[in-house]
């Protein structure tokens, strides 16, 4: 073997790093069009001059492209003149280097194909199971109104010492007259339980006025709906274009598709997503008849109820994932185009159960998972840190890096004198999303307070940060297990509705408490600058274990946090046990595993859980159990098992951080999360070569470790470290 001097190797490596640094600095100063935010447009002129004027305005304001569609006329998708106008516009934009996304619906939510699907098949409309129980005391005569829709079950269930005796239920459906129950209630306390099937209209998103019309919605649980939607939209565009969609468009944009089974107001009854194929699948897969289990699903908080709810929502997950998101992604692959867009109410774990079963499973069937943000006011955007990190975690688990956000500041006018939030506030809102993991923006945010020069500067600021963050992977040592299966078991169908625009009111107490643990853990990790990823059960089971770490692709974690994880497969818990035996650390907060995906509770899970968290076990120092979230105890538990790659002082400074590894270097994004200037000291545990990247000016300069930084209100910088 030929001898090569170490000095020569070192000089070659240093030269390569220098070239890489120079190239990245050029990209940072002059970000590519694809890194710039897009401005959505849904009404296109047909004239060449008018189209060119729109594109010139976009470019002058610093935008990189747009999401757009065939105009929403009466001939939507049928008028080939309108289709040609769209394609002309997209081609002009592409010739200018702009980035064009194909918005896939006439208004929102996606899945309706402008209403054509239900015009053809009204029987495909989205439906739900409605549940209501009323406690009454006899003897007396009562008259109770019935749930809207088709009555599925009506029973009187005796309550003795606060316990509903389901085995002593009395069928009372024969006592219905003129749309009401007329019953001579026997002595004692009774729970009148009724269940109905009905379309999801009034009180749901489908019943709201959107663009001057109330557009009802098809059920995405049905494979026929997804197939027909693709035929009427994506395939129609490809047919008229005469070539693959990827020749003109970068990605498709699906907007808020859902099961529709979450009410926007308190309707006084609980709702589950449902269509007949849900019942059919439950019978085929788990061998039970839904009609015979309705009272258990509603009232049984014990073993049987938990099992039934787990199985029910596993079916909802599979049908939503496969029949809509996977179907679109599969077709997009044939067209050389990415599937993207965002879902609905991604910020709330309990709502994810009702609308998707499992939002991470649906995100996995998108090439570019995304979120929406309904405001540019930073004080209302904290929960978007969680939704952005959920989407970003899935992107990385899938081996990708792109995450989309649609900013639509519809919530701002009542708080900002009829206008959007200020440009500086919009900067703070964008920073939070970048910290969460967003890398691409499709906006309705028009920056109406800014001049053309200020708009260009704002969009360039965003583009520079996107350039730095859109490659590499999260340098997280902490993984937080997504506890959706636990929420399935607790999600009894009781009244729940929107609380503001990003959270749920009502719901079962157990669900609210479990979701709160997840939120508090997430908030703690952000506030204390612990980089983390969310990990779903699929990612956990398929992870490999080396050197005391969990590995998924480029990702690796030293600590696994279980936030109120009570339900977990035996296979997944064995992975955790092996991880701990290999030197990994696990912290359980709020509850310990007790159920498997089959048994509720499970002897195997209880045994493994006891072994993991018993002080008598040899590896007990690697496992910590906190019965409830406590800020100080949780921080002590993390600090005891993790070393920091960097520290930020003061610890309570309102500064958010995101840490990634890219091309052999480390990238730290620091954002002032307040409307006042902040000074902070940053110290890295290792490294020799540090540079500061200013997204406002594009300037890159060397900096020494440790470093003291002054950040203007809602401002951000990037620190790059090369060892």
Image (cartoon, grey):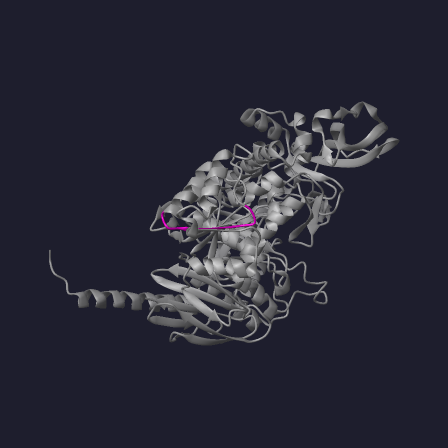
- The picture places residue 719, in percent across and down from the top left corner, at 42, 69
Q: Is residue 584 magenta?
A: yes
Front in this rendered view, residue 304 or 682:
304
- The picture places residue 387, in percent across and down from the top left corner, at 56, 53
Q: Is residue 517 magenta?
A: no
**Which corner quadrant holds the N terminus?**
bottom left
Front in this rendered view, residue 560 or 703:
560
> Given the current orientation, which residue lies at the most extreme front position?
616
| Residue 113 shows up from this direction | no
Decide: is 555 above or below 236: below
Q: Give the magenta range.
A: 582-591
Front in this rendered view, residue 165 or 706:
165
Decide: is 285 above or below 687: above
| Residue 397 shows up from this direction | yes
> Given the current orientation, which residue lies at the most extreme top position?
174
**Which corner quadrant holds the C terminus?**
bottom left
- The picture places residue 695, in percent across and down from the top left corner, at 47, 70
- The picture places residue 274, in percent across and down from the top left corner, at 64, 34
Count of number-bearing discs:
0
Q: Residue at x 61, y 59 (%)?
A: 444
Decide: is 138 above or below 514: above
């Amino acid at each position: 073997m030929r001898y090569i001097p170490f000095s020569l190797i070192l000089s070659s490596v240093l030269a390569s790093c220098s070239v890489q640094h120079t190239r990245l600095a050029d990209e940072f100063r002059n970000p590519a069009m694809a890194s710039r935010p897009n401005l959505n447009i849904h009404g296109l002129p047909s004239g060449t001059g008018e189209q060119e004027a729109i594109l010139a305005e976009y470019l002058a304001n610093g935008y990189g492209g747009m999401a757009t569609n065939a105009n929403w006329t009466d001939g939507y998708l049928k008028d080939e003149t309108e289709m040609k106008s769209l394609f002309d516009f997209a081609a002009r934009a592409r010739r200018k280097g702009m980035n064009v996304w194909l918005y896939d619906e006439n208004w929102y939510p996606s899945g309706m194909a402008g209403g054509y699907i239900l015009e053809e098949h009204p029987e495909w409309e989205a439906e739900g199971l409605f549940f209501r129980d009323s406690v009454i005391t006899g003897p007396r005569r009562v008259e109770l109104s019935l749930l809207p829709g088709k009555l599925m079950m009506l029973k009187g269930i005796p309550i003795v010492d606060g316990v509903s005796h389901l085995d002593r239920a009395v069928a009372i459906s024969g006592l219905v007259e003129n749309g009401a129950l007329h019953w001579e209630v026997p002595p004692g306390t009774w729970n009148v339980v009724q269940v109905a099937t009905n379309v999801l209209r009034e009180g749901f998103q489908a019943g709201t006025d959107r663009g001057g019309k109330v557009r009802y919605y098809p059920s995405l649980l049905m494979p026929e709906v997804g197939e027909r939607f693709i035929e009427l939209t994506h395939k129609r565009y490809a047919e008229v274009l005469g070539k693959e969609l990827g020749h003109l468009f970068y990605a498709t944009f699906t907007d808020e598709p859902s099961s529709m089974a979450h009410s926007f107001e308190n309707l006084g009854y609980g709702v589950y997503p449902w269509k007949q194929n849900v019942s059919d699948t439950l019978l085929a897969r788990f061998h039970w008849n839904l009609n015979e289990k309705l009272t258990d699903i509603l009232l049984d908080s014990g073993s049987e109820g938990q099992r039934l709810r787990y199985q029910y929502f596993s079916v909802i997950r599979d049908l939503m994932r496969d029949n809509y998101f996977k179907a679109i992604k599969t077709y997009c692959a044939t067209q050389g185009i990415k599937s993207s867009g965002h879902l609905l109410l991604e910020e709330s774990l309990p709502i994810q159960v009702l609308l998707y079963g499992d939002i991470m499973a649906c995100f996995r069937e998108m090439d570019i998972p995304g979120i929406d943000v309904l405001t540019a006011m930073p004080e209302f955007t904290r929960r978007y840190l969680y939704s952005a990190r959920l989407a970003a975690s899935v992107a990385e688990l899938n081996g990708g890096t792109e995450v989309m956000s649609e900013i639509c500041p519809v919530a701002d006018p009542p708080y900002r004198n009829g206008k959007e939030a200020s440009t500086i506030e919009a900067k703070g809102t964008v920073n939070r999303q970048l910290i969460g993991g967003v890398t691409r923006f499709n906006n309705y945010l028009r920056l109406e307070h800014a001049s053309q020069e200020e708009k260009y500067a704002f969009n360039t600021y965003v583009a520079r940060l996107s350039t730095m963050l859109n490659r590499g992977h999260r340098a997280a040592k902490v993984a937080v297990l997504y506890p959706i299966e636990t929420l399935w078991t607790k999600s009894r169908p009781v009244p729940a509705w929107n609380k503001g625009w990003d959270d749920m009111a009502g719901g079962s107490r157990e669900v609210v408490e479990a979701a709160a643990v997840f939120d508090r853990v997430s908030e703690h990790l952000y506030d204390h600058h612990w980089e983390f990823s969310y990990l779903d059960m699929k990612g956990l089971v398929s992870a490999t274990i080396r050197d005391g770490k969990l590995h998924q692709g480029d990702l690796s974690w030293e600590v696994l946090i279980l936030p109120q994880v009570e339900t977990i497969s035996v296979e997944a818990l064995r992975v955790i046990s092996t991880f701990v035996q290999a030197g990994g650390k696990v912290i359980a907060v709020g509850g310990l595993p007790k159920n498997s995906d089959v048994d509720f509770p499970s002897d195997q899970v209880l045994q493994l859980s006891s072994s993991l968290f018993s002080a008598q076990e040899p590896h007990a120092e690697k496992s910590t159990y906190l019965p409830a979230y406590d800020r100080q105890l949780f921080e002590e538990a993390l600090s005891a098992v993790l070393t920091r790659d960097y520290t930020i002082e003061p610890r309570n400074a309102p500064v958010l951080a995101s840490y990634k590894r890219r091309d052999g270097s480390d990238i730290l994004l620091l954002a002032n999360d307040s409307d006042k200037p902040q000074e902070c000291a940053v110290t890295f545990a290792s490294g020799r070569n540090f540079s500061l990247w200013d997204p406002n000016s594009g300037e890159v300069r060397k900096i020494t470790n440790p470093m003291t930084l002054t950040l203007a209100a809602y401002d951000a910088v990037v620190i790059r470290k090369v060892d």
